[in-house]
Amino acid sequence: MPEEARRRDGDHAVVIPIGTGGRPGRGSGSARPSSAARNLAPTARKAASTKSSTKPATKPTTKTATKPSAKPATPAAGKKRARAGTSDEKVVPPPVDAEPTTADDTEQPSPGTGIPVGEWLAAAQDAAQEIFGADWERRLAELMAFVRRRLEGDYDVDDYGFDRELTERFFMAALRPIAEKWFRLEVRGLENIPAEGGALVVSNHSGTVPLDGLMTMLTVHDHTGRFLRPLGADLVFKLPLISSLARKGGATLACTEDAERMLSGGELVGVWPEGFKGIGKPFSERYKLQRFGRGGFVSAALRTGVPIIPLSLVGAEEIYPLVGNVPSLARLLGVPYIPITPFFPWLGPLGMVPLPSKWILEFGEPIRTDAYEPGEAEDPMLVFNVTDQVRETIQHTLFDLLRERGNAFG
Amino acid sequence: MGRVVLVTGISRDIGRRFARAATGDPSIDRVIGVDAVPPRGDIGDVSFVRADIRNPVIAKVIAKEDVDTVVHMSVIATPGSAGGRGTMKELNVIGSMQLLAACQKSATVERLVVKSTTTVYGSGPRDPAMFTEDMGPKRLPSSGYAKDVYEIEGYVRGFARRRPDVDVTMIRAANVVGPHVSSPLTNYFRLPVIPRVLGFDPRLQLLHEDDLMRVLCHAATTGVPGTFNVAGDGVMTLSQAVRRLGTPSVSLPRFAVGRLGSTMRQARVSDFSPEQLGFLTYGRGVDTTRMRTVLGFEPQFTTAETFADFCQSIAPAVREGAGRA
């Protein structure tokens, strides 16, 4: 429809030059109509589409629209003549052309001139159905209630600052398509996650950016309904924005006090003992586990008697292949490393898109710690042995999974 | 024969109100209020003794009145009300030392209740989510109120060691909020536009002023020795608080908030000390298990209820006197 209208405009433009005397800017025969001509010509279209316009030049056209039964364009042209003085030449052709369209307009105000209200509503309903599904009315009401609660601060956070509602409805919803469509997560060994009670999920850490932690949280929640409470490095809580998001997402500081408090409170806690050594390791060392901290997570589990669930995660190493680092800049900014990948920072923001590797998560068999006395957490040899056991389990599972997966992007 | 309670810091609103509330307690015979300046409001049956706890006169008061319970609550948080940081430090630290010295000499004192604060734990990115009474600050406070309180707590512990026969109760109260409280935090919430630190959403834990009165009375009458965190249940984030308050807020980078704070301090609009800035950046949470199990105290208000009560009290005031702040 717009094309037709434009063609009509063009026709007028061809008609306009009669008697212009070659004055520049006033219908000099060019393909583009002058501003005066544009005001004059497409009466019908303007009438509908510029009703709200307050420009004085459009006044005549709106007038024509209000009384379409009379010869609509003539008064407009008359006015124009009074204003423009000389450019009255094409008065006749436009009305001839425009008359049918104006008639059209009054009967069914549709083609190209605006969409009737009914159709807008139908479209909005369709859109709502598309987004919210069949029971969109209820879902929409829920969404509005959610927004209102958020704006009024009428929601609860737990002692660690975990905002369950925000996490479920916003963070998880944002991550889900990435997990399913981009990384095509495959999960195994879900039966090893206890349905209730405290447990400590220990995982390898990789990928330059701790996306693996986020994906693990999402996976655990989607498959078991429990929230994985990650323990984060103190840098996480030092950085603006990241710190508040982390607390709202359920994280807390990786320290003995918090770990034991969460575990004895019956939470499912996630820990990545490699820390920055793990996510910031070069691509050449992929899938080689780094040192597992000082085994603090093991003593926390021993003291609270919760099982340790080893999680091996394959795929995160390839999302941002770290090939370089800028240690001096990193020191300056107070961060552990500045990543250089084959695409970042060379491609700018585009380089921040993770590569679509295939991910496999395997939760291993729980390592029970309730057989030990809580006092045995003070025995460093036992702590080191259990730490090594967890580390070896994850490392071997990683090799198995890698062999099985084959092509990283397959 | 009931108890004779000596309350320090009675010129301030909280001290005065506690003293009045204590006179209503059946197990308390007499309440003696002590301060360097007379109290501004009605003190009811409390007998006021004008004495400066910074000089040894306080020992004579204790001896003459046969005081057996001392409630020390004259630790002030803001230099503005005391007339400068130097005076504030002297009142807080030297005053507490003199008071403890007097208590140590006294033969009648059986109980000492000190109103401390959770500010002593500090606020930082390396803090655990919840502080228990056994933990100390991750970084020693270098200045201000937090340092004073830290030092006073040290002297109180020293006193408890030297006089094991005296029951020493230290109440580490969370930020006290209520319709009548004028503290750095309540003044902050009364600002017409609330400045926040960009990218941080601290957890706050509040204690209602009535609960503070009750816990001090409880400690003075039961005399359970030890250090206790006292706070309302639950935490709320600053963003939640601001939204529930309905006041507009503006997020600024941390250094800008600090600059704004010092400007406001100079203009005497609000007291925005460095430890306050740390608190509004990183927040703090304390574990109150021992308050329930050992002290046997149950606060009436949760953090959310405390704040709701506070909101109700200030909502009209903010609307009328937004320019006054």
Image (cartoon, coloured by chain):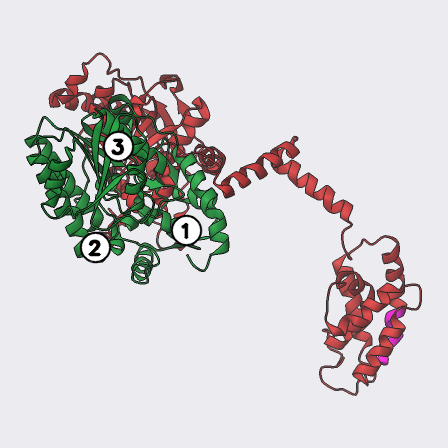
Chain colours: A red, B green
Residue A42, percent from left and from top: 80, 67
Q: Residue furthest right?
A: A70
Instruction: Report which quarter residue A127 is drawn in.
Output: top right
Near mark 3 (Cα within 10 A), the count class, few <14, some 14-19 or many ≥20, is many
Residue B229's disc number: 3
* Disc 2 from disc 3: Cα separation: 44 Å
**Chain letter for mark 1:** B
Q: Which amino acid lies under the numbered mark 1 shown in the image of this protein?
A: Arg
Q: Which residue is mark 2?
A: A328
Q: Which amino acid lies under the numbered mark 2 shown in the image of this protein?
A: Ser
Left or right: where A234 falls relative to A23: left
Near mark 1 (Cα within 10 A), the count class, few <14, some 14-19 or many ≥20, is many
Q: Which residue is mark 1?
A: B190
- Quarter of the image with the N terminus of chain B is top left
Residue A409 appears in view: no
Residue B143, percent from left and from top: 18, 51
